[in-house]
């Protein structure tokens, strides 16, 4: 299945983001960074308690968003085999978050990530993520902040 540019309007992004947030609340996760590119999504999530279950979060997020998207648009949302990766302990959360938020810049969609409408975080402001590395600060995800 070829990727389609589905995430190009605010209503579609809002529909899918609402289901990501619903799943995050149910599975006790925070959306540390997200970026809806035209044909795919980047998510960085962090568990907020010991029994947060990443597989269950991903399953619910895809199931909920896929269901509501198909109801409105009569087509499948997700590819069968997504790419998922877990951060290792030595990877700074804000470095990865910044990489995610800079995707529209690297793709030539904007000259400043702050101008791209389909990215954000539940945990940090966009400026905190983009400026943390410049300031020489790259702390890990802080559950207390979520």
Image: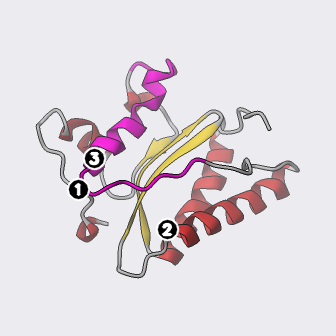
Q: In 3D space, how far apart are the residues under numbered discs 3 and 2 (Cα atoms)?
A: 19 Å
- The local crowd at label 3, few if under 14, some if 14 to 19, many if 20 or more residues have their Cα within 10 Å, is many
Q: Position of residue 69 (x, y in %)?
A: 76, 54
Q: Is 2 displayed left or right of 96 in the figure? A: right
* Disc 2 element: helix
Note whether 102 is above or below 87 in the view shown: above
Magenta span contains residue 85: yes
Q: In 3D space, how far apart are the residues under numbered discs 1 and 3 (Cα atoms)?
A: 7 Å
Q: Which residue is mark 1?
A: 140
Q: Which residue is mark 3?
A: 94
Q: Position of residue 142 (x, y in %)?
A: 24, 63
**Label 3 close to label 2 by CB (< 8 Å):** no
Image quadrant in which you'd find residue 145: bottom left
Magenta span contains residue 66: no
* Disc 3 element: helix
Q: Earlier in the sequence, mark 1 or mark 3?
A: 3
Marks 3, 2: nearer the viewer: 2
Q: Is 90 displayed left or right of 118 in the figure? A: left
Q: Earlier in the sequence, mark 2 or mark 1?
A: 2
Q: Nearer the viewer, residue 107 or 8?
A: 107
Q: Which residues are magenta?
A: 83-111
Note whether 109 is above or below 75 in the view shown: above
**Label 1 close to label 3 by CB (< 8 Å):** no
Q: Which residue is mark 2?
A: 54
**Circle count:** 3
* Disc 1 element: loop
Q: In 3D space, how far apart are the residues under numbered discs 2 and 1 (Cα atoms)?
A: 18 Å
Q: Position of residue 53 (x, y in %)?
A: 48, 74
């Amino acid at each position: 299945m070829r990727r389609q540019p589905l995430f190009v309007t605010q209503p579609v992004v809002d529909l899918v983001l609402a289901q990501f947030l619903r799943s995050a609340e149910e599975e006790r996760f925070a959306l540390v960074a997200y970026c809806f590119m035209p044909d795919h999504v980047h998510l960085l999530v962090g568990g907020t308690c010991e029994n947060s279950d990443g597989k269950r979060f991903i399953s619910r997020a895809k199931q909920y968003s896929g269901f509501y998207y198909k109801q409105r648009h009569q087509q499948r949302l997700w590819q069968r085999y997504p790419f998922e990766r877990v951060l290792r302990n030595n990877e700074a959360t804000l470095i990865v978050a910044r990489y995610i938020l800079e995707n529209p810049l690297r793709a030539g969609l904007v000259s400043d990530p702050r101008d791209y409408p389909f990215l954000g975080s539940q945990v940090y402001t966009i400026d905190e993520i983009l400026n943390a590395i410049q300031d020489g600060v790259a702390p890990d995800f802080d559950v207390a902040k979520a």
